[in-house]
Amino acid sequence: MPGAVTPATTAQAAPGAETGGRTAISEQAVAKVAAIAARAVPGVHTLGTGSGRTLGAVRDAVAGSDSSATAGVNVEVGETEAAVDITLVAAYGTPLTGIADNVRHAVYAAVEDLVGLNVVEVNVSIADVFIPDPLDNRIGQRQPGGNSQE
C-alpha cells in the first residue's frame, strides 16, 4: 500500500537478553541509592552517628570527598546480590520499629529497581533519637512582629 508507514527494524536486544559484555556496579553507587532511599523515609533525621557525621564533615572539608552522601551506609556487592547496613538517627515521636521497617522496605525497593541487584538483607541500626531543642520550638511558635508588652 503506497504511503503506508512500516516500522523500522533495528538490531536492539530484547530486555534481559544477553548482548555480550559485563556490567560492574560499585559499592559507592549502591550505597548512594540506599542512602537516598533511607533519607526519604519520614522519621529519619539523618544517617550515621553523631561522631561519624562530625568526622565525615571534617574529612569532606579537607579532602573534598563525597563521603557524607553515604554516611551511615555500608554495602557489600556481589555480581547479582547486595547486602546493606544502615545506621541512622531517628526523629523523636516516630515509632522506631516503624522507621526501621519503612527504611528496610525503601532500600529494598530502590536498590532492586534502580540498581538491578537482588537485595539479600537490609540491616537497620538506630543509633540515636534526635530531640529538637525546646528553644527552637518556642521561637517557631512566636508570632512575627508580636510584642509581649502591651
Image: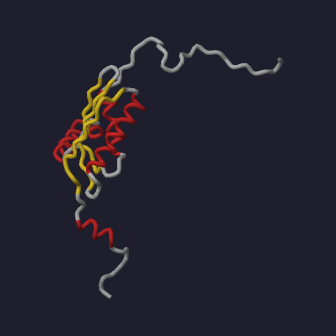
**Viewer-nearest residue: 24 or 122:** 122
Q: Is residue 48 above or below residue 17?
A: below
| Quadrant assignment, res 88 | top left
- Relative image position of residue 37 (x, y in whole percent): 36, 41
| Quadrant assignment, res 39 | top left
- Relative image position of residue 96 (x, y in whole percent): 26, 50
**Residue at image location 36% in from the left, 40% down from the top:** 106
Residue at the extreme right of the image, as rendered: 2
The type of colouring in the image is secondary structure
In the picture, which quadrant includes the N terminus? top right
**Residue at image location 56% in from the left, 16% down from the top:** 12
- Relative image position of residue 144 (x, y in whole percent): 37, 74
In the picture, which quadrant includes the C terminus? bottom left
**Residue at image location 23% in from the left, 66% down from the top:** 134
- Relative image position of residue 73 (x, y in whole percent): 26, 37
| Quadrant assignment, res 49 | top left
Q: Is residue 5 left or right of residue 39?
A: right
Q: Is residue 13 left or right of residue 42?
A: right
Residue at the extreme left of the image, as rendered: 51
**Viewer-nearest residue: 50 or 84:** 84
Q: Is residue 132 above or below residue 99?
A: below
**Viewer-nearest residue: 134 or 87:** 87
**Viewer-nearest residue: 11 or 60:** 11
